[in-house]
Amino acid sequence: VWVDLEDEGMDKKILLRSDGTAVYMTQDLGTARVRFEDHQFTKMVYTVADEQNYHFKVLFTILKKMGEPYADGLHHLSYGMVNLPEGKMKSREGTVVDADDLMEEVIGEARKNTSEMGSISNLPQAEQEEIFRKIGMAALKFFILKVNPKKSMIFDPKESVDLQGQTGPYIQYSIVRANRVLEKGAQDGVDMKQALAYAELQQQEKDLLLMLHGFPALAVEAADNLDPSAIANFCYDLAKAYHKFYHDLSVLKADTEAAKAFRLQLCQGVSKVLTKSLDLLGIEVPKQM
């Protein structure tokens, strides 16, 4: 069984071999219908490498010719390839990297870096391992998601855990730092309502306010464009702006109670938005780092 797509600028495509066995296309035709029957979706996104662009062009064309009611709601998010510093992963040459092995390597890098810092050495070993896992998975996910989906990239495990770079752990550390300041403010009994009396905003504070204000619209745009890299890059820009604010302006030792309360509210806003942003990317935040 085959379909002639030459009038669509494609070739003749086999759908079923003469011995009755299926090909990839046969299976994708079947699963598309089963998914629609199970979920009654209005849109379905296939996140598959750009090497399969032609396959999905053919699949969607066949489904439209078959008159399937869901055919117009199908989209192929043509994803760029993820390579390692050693080069491309090729199954035929035996250089395939299992996801489990890659995750373990990144978690190992997180364990090494965090242990050298000694900041969580007082915690029970089980808690330390959970923090290593969260940092490692943040490193892996963020490093991949910060690149536009359609672009190929090189994933470097060591670079991904760098606390000074554009990485998941750097964003996590920003949240941990903001939360630590908030805890100290609560211990000092700061009245947050006094922030209303603060009027002379510094440029660093204005920058943070504008970024926080723009987050909802940016999140919607990222969803519409199927592009999580917009959120990942926003996270980095916000974290970088927060570190500048934290370095340039005193929070808990501000000149007035109004300034202290206002800056604590800024810390709270940054923590909430960064935490929400990482949650959208599937990244957890440890309480300590």
Image (cartoon, rainbow, N blue to C red):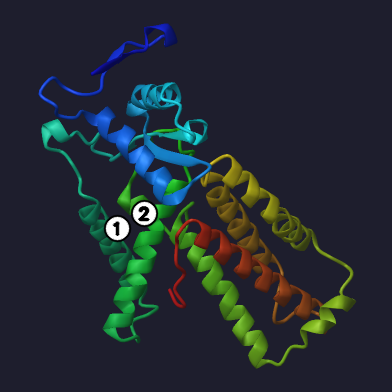
Amino acid type at image mark 1: Val
Give the number of the disc on residue 106.
1
Q: Name which quarter of the figure residue 210 lies in.
A: bottom right
279 vs 146: above or below: below
**What residue is shown at x 26% (from left), y 63% (from top)?**
108
- N-term mark: 2 or 1: 1
Q: Along the horizontal axis of the image, is 238 left or right of 95?
A: right
Give the residue pinned by disc 2: 140
Q: Along the horizontal axis of the image, is 124 left or right of 250?
A: left
Quadrant of the snapshot with the N terminus: top left
* Residue 256 in view (yes/no): no
**What residue is shown at x 47% (from left), y 31% (from top)?**
71
Quadrant of the snapshot with the C terminus: bottom left
Do residues under tags 2 and 1 come within 8 Å of each other at their CB atoms? yes
Which percent across, then down, holds residue 257?
81, 84
Q: Name which quarter of the figure residue 63 lies in.
A: top left
Amino acid type at image mark 2: Leu
207 vs 258: above or below: above
Q: Along the horizontal axis of the image, is 271 left or right of 6?
A: right
186 vs 225: above or below: below
**What residue is shown at x 88% (from left), y 67% (from top)?**
200
Number of residues whose C-alpha sits closer than 10 Å to that of mark 1, classed few (under 14), some (14–19) or many (20 or more): many
Q: Along the horizontal axis of the image, is 200 left or right of 60?
A: right
Number of residues whose C-alpha sits closer than 10 Å to that of mark 2, classed few (under 14), some (14–19) or many (20 or more): many
* Residue 31 in view (yes/no): yes
| Distance from the alpha carbon under mark 2 to that under mark 1 | 7 Å
Which percent across, then down, holds residue 53?
38, 25
SS at mark 2? helix
